[in-house]
Image: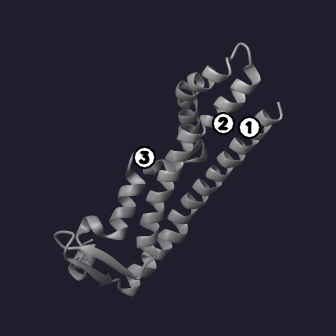
Amino acid sequence: MSVIKSRCPVPPEQLPINQYEDVRDSWFYGWGGRSLKGYLKPVVVLWILSWLVTGPIVGASYGPSRYPLPFGLLAAAAALILPGLALAQLYVGWFHVGQRLQQAAVFYEESGWYDGQMWQKPEDILNRDRLIMDYQVKPVLQRVRNTLGCLLALGVALITAWQFL
């Protein structure tokens, strides 16, 4: 780090490599880089917790005892919203860091919003950052995109099934 710091005017908290490490190690964004089981568990937990909100709302129109199938289909589809929003936020955070890793020049602020500067990354740092983007960040982004696609397809399937009742 001292080699980079001596050549780099960017404050440490604004360096793309440090932002990547912060995202990777955070309790929320770190979820994207976990094993498949560790990644899917929060999605399922959020979906189940969402039933606490969507169940009563859907139950007001389709009583579970009188209309169990429409209730189940609509509540399950509506409960996909919270995990979808969490995954969208996860994607945005990783995407932002990935873009900063990918860029050859980094925008930074020395002391406030009014004094922004650009720092051209040296070739060795640019290569390192792009390797991190290709082998660490892109797989997370692809996983989140795939999961969002699956949630969307599942939601459409549940609503379509409800319409044919």
> Mark 3 touching mark 1, by CB under 8 A?
no
Looking at the image, residue 95 lies above or below residue 102:
above
In whole angstroms, how far apart are the C-alphas of marks 1 and 2? 6 Å
In whole angstroms, how far apart are the C-alphas of marks 3 and 1? 28 Å
Q: Which residue is mark 3?
A: 28
Whether residue 38 can be seen here: no
The furthest residue to the right? 164
What secondary structure is marked by label 1?
helix
For disc 2, the neighbor class at 10 Å (few under 14, some 14 to 19, many from 20) is many
The picture quadrant where one finds residue 55 is top right
Q: Residue at x 69, y 24 (%)?
A: 71
Q: Which residue is mark 1?
A: 158
According to the image, what is the colour scheme of the structure? one colour
User: First in sequence: mark 1 or mark 2?
Assistant: 2
The furthest residue to the top? 65
Q: Residue at x 22, y 79 (%)?
A: 9
The furthest residue to the front? 61
Whole-percent x, y for residue 89 in the image: 47, 52
Residue 161 located left or right of residue 141: right
User: First in sequence: mark 2 or mark 3?
Assistant: 3
**Depth order, front residue of 146/121:** 146
Residue 77 numbered mark, or none: 2
The quarter in which the N terminus is drawn is bottom left
> Mark 1 touching mark 2, by CB under 8 A?
yes
Whole-percent x, y for residue 34 in the image: 52, 48
The picture quadrant where one finds residue 123 is bottom left
The picture quadrant where one finds residue 58 is top right
**Depth order, front residue of 110/63:** 63
Residue 47 located left or right of residue 162: left
Looking at the image, residue 87 lies above or below residue 76:
below
Badge 2 amino acid: Ala
